[in-house]
Image (tube, helix red, strand yellow):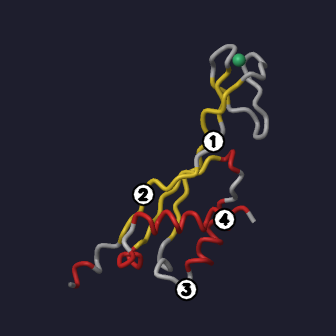
Amino acid sequence: MHELSVAESVVEIIQQYVPRTDLNRVRCVRMKIGEFGGVVTDSLTFCFQAITAQTDLSKASLEIEHIPFAVRCQECGQESRPEFGTVVCEHCGALRTTVISGNELQVVDINLDDSLAEAT
Ligand SMILES: [Zn+2]
């Protein structure tokens, strides 16, 4: 199950950036996911909630921004967004294209709840 391993790596990334004592303050985790990766958003959210439910990250939720698949043509230089799974330039029909977006899988922002800090 692809989404489960993605969810696990998201948790690892959060643990890398957020000190262990602050993990229970993590609320919103913003991500960019390229559609070329084939990750199903609902499924990823479900897996993330499932593996964090009994942990300090139980209040964290994912906010996912989708990056559309796009290629640049090496023949005519124009960008196109071909149908998923193909890399044909939609301007000149060339097959020599380079994927320029759609491979993203990154955490862009981790939002912490500050209200707990004021209690000290
Ligand atoms: Zn072209």
Dot 1: what SS? loop
Corner quadrant of residue 5: bottom right
Question: Which residue is drawn at the image coordinates 78% and 39% (left, top)?
Answer: 85
Which quadrant: the N terminus? bottom right
Label 3: how many Cα within 10 Å (few below 14, some 14–19, many 20+)? few
**Labels 2, 4: front one:** 4
Does the CB distance between marks 1 and 3 fall below 8 Å? no
Name which residue lies at 55% across and 63% down. 10
Inspect the image, locate mark 1, and give the three-letter code of the amino acid beneath it: Gly
Q: Is mark 2 on a helix, strand or loop?
A: strand
Question: Label 3: which residue?
Answer: 54
The answer to which of marks 1 and 3 sits earlier in the sequence is 3
Checking the image for residue 102, the label placed there is: 1
- Residue 49, located in which quarter of the rendered image? bottom right
What secondary structure is found at the residue carrying circle 3?
A: loop
Three-letter amino acid code of the residue under disc 3? Gln
Q: Looking at the image, is mark 3 or mark 4 nearer the viewer?
A: 4
Which numbered disc, 3 or 4, marks the residue that appears first in the sequence?
Answer: 4
Give the side of residue 109 with respect to residue 49, left or right.
Answer: left
Q: Which amino acid does label 2 sit on?
A: Asp
Q: Which residue bears the numbered disc 2?
A: 109
Q: Distance between the residues labelled 2 and 3?
A: 23 Å
Task: Find the distance from the CA under tag 4 to the CA under tag 1.
Answer: 19 Å
Quadrant where ligand 1 appears: top right
Tag in front: 4 or 1: 4
The location of residue 39, given as percent across then percent down, is 68, 56
Looking at the image, which residue is at 41% across and 75% down? 23
The residue where tag 4 is placed is 5
Instruction: Look at the numbered disc 4 and give the secondary structure of its residue.
Output: helix
Amino acid at circle 4: Ser
